[in-house]
Structures are given as C-alpha cells and as structure tokens.
Image (cartoon, rainbow, N blue to C red):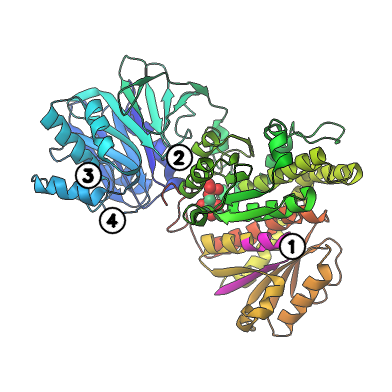
Amino acid sequence: MCGIVGYMGSKAAYPILIKGLHRLEYRGYDSAGIALLSDRLELNVYKTKGKVADLERFAESKDVSGCIGIAHTRWATHGEPNEANAHPHYSQSKGLALIHNGIIENYTVLRTELESKGYTFRSRTDTEVIVYLVEYIMQTNRVDLCTAVQLALHQVIGAYAIALIDRNNPDEIIAARKSSPLVVGIGEDEFFLASDATPIVEYTDRVVYLNDEEIAVIRRGEPLKVVNLNNVEITPEIKKLAMNLSQLEKGGYPHFMLKEIFEQPRTLQDCIRGRINIEGTQVVLSGVIDNRDKFLNAHRIIIVACGTSWHAALIGEHLIEDLCRIPVEVEYASEFRYRNPVIHPGDIVIAISQSGETADTLAAIELAKSKGAFIYGICNVVGSSIARATDSGSYIHVGPEIGVASTKAFTGQVTVLSMLALTIAQQKGTLSQTRFEEMVKELQGIPDKLSKVLKNSEVVKELSKIFTYARNFIYLGRGYNYPAALEGALKLKEISYIHAEGYPAAEMKHGPIALIDVEMPVVAIATTDSIYEKTISNIQEIKARQGKVIAIVSEGDEMVRGIADYCIEVPRTLEPFAPLVASVPLQLLAYYIAVNKGRNVDQPRNLAKSVTVE
Ligand code: M6R
C-alpha cells in the first residue's frame, strides 16, 4: 500500500525516482508525487491524481533538476485520491517535504493540537500532521531534522514508513519505519530508499532493511547511520540482494499477470529445487527439520493468512490433516487478531504471505507470539517484515510477483505446503514410504504438467469470449478443489469486476442453487478424485436448472464431458495436487475475460498488491 522511493547522490534524481515509482506502482496507483531539491535549492513538489505516467506528463514543463528527492505512489486511506491529498506533503512553511506509507491512528488529536497553535492544513490526509509536527518541533525546540523526527514519532500512534527532505539541507534524507517496510540501498557515493528492493536492484545489490522504530540518517559523504527513536545507534546489517532485473520486466508479455501465469512451470521447479533428494526418497524443508520436535509434538497448527494466501492455507489444512494427522485451523488474519483466540504455547502458527508485509498477518503473528506459539512463515519476498518476524520458515522462491492478482505465488505456496506436509509426515511416520515416494515423484512432475496446461491456453482464450459479458459466475469444487474454486472466483472478480462466488459444490442445494438459471455460468472443478461421482451429481443439479457449466476435467474424462457445456482438460495427478493443475486454467480464464473487457489487469481498480494497512 503506497510506494516510497528516495535518492541522494550525484546523478539526476528525477529519472531514478520516476523509474522507482513505476516499479512500485503495484503498491498503489491512485495518485503520485515527487519532491526534489533543485539545483537552485528550491524544494519543488509536483503531484497529481492518477498514475505515475500522469505525474510524468504533469512534470514535463517543470524544473526537475536536483540530485536529491523523494517520491510516492498512493493507495488512498484518508482523503480521496486528488492532488491535495497526494504525497509528498509540505510542512507549513514549505521548508520540509514528507512521504508516508501507513496510517496515523491519532492524527485527529495531533491535527487539532496543531490547529490550536495556528497551523492550517492543506489536505485531508492523516500524513500531513507528521510533517507539520516535525517542523513545529524543529522550530520550537531548535533541533535538527533527525531529532525532530524522533520526538515527533514518540507522539505518533500507528504504522509508518516515512522519508523527509529539508530545503535547508540538500545533503540529507531522514527515513523511518514502524510496521511498514523500508529498504535503504547503498551504492557508490549514493543512497536509494524504497518500500521494497525492486527500485534499487538495478543500481546496487547492497541493502539494509530497516526494523521497526529505526531511523535511517542518510547523509552525503557519510556512511549510512541507523538510530532508534531514543537516538541509540544501531549497526546496520548490509544484505546482498538476490533479485535480478529481468525478473522485474514483462519479458515480451502484454501483462505481468500473463507472464507470471506462464512462469509457473519454472517457478515451481525453483520452489522444489534442493528440497527433494535425487532419489526422491526424502523431502528436506530445512525450517521444518530444524524444528523437528516442535512439529512432531504439535497438538494443533493454526494457519493465518489473507486473500489468495488464505486459499493456499485451506489447501494446507487438507494436506497436513490428511498426511500428518495434526489438527489444523485456518483463520483470516484480520479476524484472528481481534478475536482473543485460544493459543497454547505448544501450538504452531503458520503465517502465509506473498509480500510478507500484510498488516493483518503481521499483527496475527505478533498476537500468536505473545501467547507463546512457535511461528513459521511461508513468504515470497526475501527479507520482508513477516519473514523477519517469524521464528522459522520457508521461502516459496517464485521470484517477484508484480501483477496485483496473485498467481505464481499461490501455486508456490501450495507447493511449499505440500513439501511441508510431506516432510512432517515422513518424520512422523504417518505415511508409508511407498505412498510418500509416489507423492514426491508426482510433485516433482507437476511443473511439466503445468507446461501441458499452458499449451492449452488458446482453448481457454476462446472460451473466455463466450463469457466476457456474464454478470455473475459461480465456482464449485469439493475437497482439495474447494479452495481452488474460491481462488478461481477471487481471480475473476478482482481483475474483471464480474461478481463471482466460490462454493463447496454440495453446499449449492442449501441456498445458492436458487441463483441458477440459463444466464449463470458455473465453473465446476471435476477432476478425477475420491469424490468425483459426488461432484458429477452436483453438476447434474446445475444442468437440471439450465446453468451453463464449464468443467475442469482430467484428461480423457468422458463422464463430465457428456454433461457439461464446455470442458477444459488438465493432466491427471494425485488428489492432493489437483488444485495446482486446476488453478492454472482458472487464472487464464480470469485473465482473458478481463482483457476482453479492457480492464487494467495488472493494476485493477481499488486494489494494491501489498496491503500494509488494516
Ligand atoms: O502478500 P499477501 O499474500 O499477504 O497478500 C494477501 C492478499 O492481499 C492477496 O493475496 C490478495 O488477495 C491478492 N490480490 C489476490 O490476488
């Protein structure tokens, strides 16, 4: 939510900042702005409603000189998306400029106090109070910017990643974080600042991830200094970035989402690589092995996540209960954090998050931690807040996911959950070695099966044309495929804006079947599994009411083909891995329908990739 970027060095800041904003645009895209300390030492702020491209057009005729600046792409929380509410925000005197990602919860109290001192605000945001407060402290206490930020942040309640520049000091950026991510890139006599490493990677691979309540003091000609709110100096830990630039480009695809869908055979290989021995007789997820006793003795596992990651968690529940015989509960992180859950010290909490920055998931982790649970993270973004807040974990290693609709992260999460369940099952002895090896072999073959599914993409593309103008969709699945149905429905609604619901197929007759008529497309996942016949009966019930059925079936299926209106074939696989192969055609269906409707697939309205506010 909101992207922050900053630069200080000897190069022109404007092109670096704009490029950085483009890379971060997935985090929010309703307005954008930039603050530059110009060659004439003027503090210029340019901002506009809309996307980064609108900002570029707006700044075309402006003075964009300067080697120091900060920039922002916004996902509105307080105040509608317009120019006044866009960041950066000036201080009252226009001597400071600030950008912010997060939410200041006590901003009304702070604003009222400042108003009583004669300050007048220019926006309706929660952000503006920070920069006003910092300036007020600088002026009344006669302190420097860093000290004023420390004092101001002591008064602020909420989440923030901020960066400030000062008209009177062209050689300094002050940045701070609490519950919102911030990374500092260290180059040769230059510094970069960003919400994640994507704007930094083409300039340097040396980064420092700030921790909560840490302040980066970035000064020209000096090494990076990190202090906390009480001015205690902290030695910054410099990490090496593993990301490369090509991962951040579209690589010839029209959209990141399509690229990411097509990357899945390779990303799943990357995810599996090094975790299964050559003979296929052992799965070694090191985070689990290192904490073997905790997993073996766990009475219960709770999985917390949001959105697509929550759907992956539901598949994880099936896998762990099925293979390891450990009871599993899956919770929306946003509900879990506020409902006083019963957590015992011996419980394991698994937190799943692509971005590793989701505010609700992070808060759920903190709650579970405070009650003594062992926390295991499954994240994609290396070095992210969740990855760092957990006791142990596994990365899914699928590379940067830029499209707002999650695709390759979902299949990566399900793959890691499969390996996690297999690792525990082997250690616990809840699976025979024969069955274990059969499953491992099948899992290793999934990337090839996904390649096969993708070769069929034209079939899905053609089908999408028939349903582009449908107003509603229902997605059905049972067992392992029920979460895949939920995920299929989420994909469609978030990028095409068509109303779609996922249900366990047998639940239809308890209410939703009333919706079925000739205009209702129903996507039924009916791959051959232990409840295949039951699913067929559910499809019959839909057909009896004239619903239009699009079925995802196993290769060579004849039964469903005889009933459904349209069929998409996927390779046969073991039941626990069915969601991996079934979800790919559903991603494609959503993608093509959205493209047919002319939607902005990679940046759908109202959404942001990384939900860092609750
Ligand atoms: O980064 P996370 O996995 O924690 O994100 C959770 C959800 O916000 C995310 O999956 C969201 O639902 C996606 N837009 C789904 O495509």
Q: Is residue 396 left or right of residue 243?
A: right
Query: Magenta stretch?
Result: 470-486
Q: Which residue is mark 1?
A: 479
- Whether the residue carrying mark 1 lies under 8 Å from ligand 1 is answered with no
Q: Quadrant of residue 200?
A: top left
**Corner quadrant of residue 308:** bottom right
Q: Is residue 264 visible to the viewer in this orientation of the structure?
A: yes
The amino acid type, in three-letter code, at marker 3 is Val
Residue extending furthest toward the left: 118
Q: Which mark is residue 129?
A: 3
Label 1 vs label 4: CA separation?
A: 43 Å
Q: Nearer the viewer, mark 3 or mark 2?
A: 3
Circle 4 is placed at which residue position?
79
Residue highlighted by disc 2: 23
Give SS at disc 4.
Answer: loop
Earlier sequence position, callout 1 versus callout 4: 4
Of tags 2 and 4, the one toward the viewer is 4
Helix, strand or loop under label 3 = helix
Residue 283 vs residue 466: left or right?
right
Residue 411 pos. (x, y %): 67, 48
Is residue 60 visible to us here?
Answer: no
Left or right of 387 on screen, residue 457: right
* Position of residue 297 measured from the top left corner of the image (x, y, whole percent): 72, 41
User: N-terminal of the two: label 2 or label 1?
Assistant: 2
